[in-house]
Amino acid sequence: MDDPGLATDPSAPVSERAGGVGAVVRPPQSAMPGPRRGVHGDRPRQTRVVLRRVGPWSVFKFSLLFYFCIMLVVLLALAMLYAVLGAVGALDSITRLARDLFADQSFAIHGSWIFARLTLVGLAMVLVWSLVNVFVAFLYNLISDVLGGVEVTLAERK
């Protein structure tokens, strides 16, 4: 019984083979659980569920993460655009144009200053839109008390 190559399941029925070594008896393939079918045989089962309440705390957490990811994607895209504009010399041309137009020789474009402000604005927008989503969740909960919620049909895959 201490043979490391022998694997047995203690909860399964064991039959005795020649030599006294136990073997796991498996049920026939037809008895194995699989996708359950509905009353009509081939069609998968369907059920209707009514969404009556949305948790505001879960909406807030999900919204914070979602909008933070959106903010990161937008900042990354803007950083790539800034790098491309710097590489082709467009930022230097804009700086020279602004100096010539406004006669201000101290004008310069500072990427770190711009992106620091964009990050702060982005974080503020993440918080604002997350709170808007929480407000919408509260409104949904109030309206679903009156109208009964949203009906969703769930079905098994074939």
Image (spheres, rainbow, N blue to C red):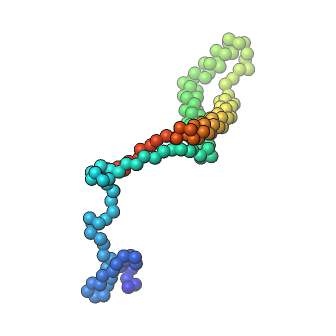
Q: x, y percentage for residue 2?
A: 40, 84
Q: Is residue 122 left or right of residue 35?
A: right
Let me know if residue 87 appears in the view: no
Q: Is residue 24 above or below residue 77?
A: below
Q: Is residue 14 above or below residue 35?
A: below
Q: x, y percentage for residue 138?
A: 62, 39
Which image quadrant is residue 18 in? Answer: bottom left
Let me know if residue 144 appears in the view: yes
Q: Is residue 53 left or right of residue 16?
A: right
Image label count: 0
Q: Quadrant of the N terminus?
A: bottom left
Question: Which residue is farthest front?
Answer: 146
Residue positioned 37% across, 82% down in the render: 3
Q: Is residue 66 above or below residue 15?
A: above
Residue positioned 69% across, 15% down in the render: 99
Residue positioned 32% across, 77% down in the render: 24
Closer to the camera in the image, 27 or 98: 27
Residue positioned 55% across, 29% down in the render: 81
Closer to the camera in the image, 154 or 58: 154
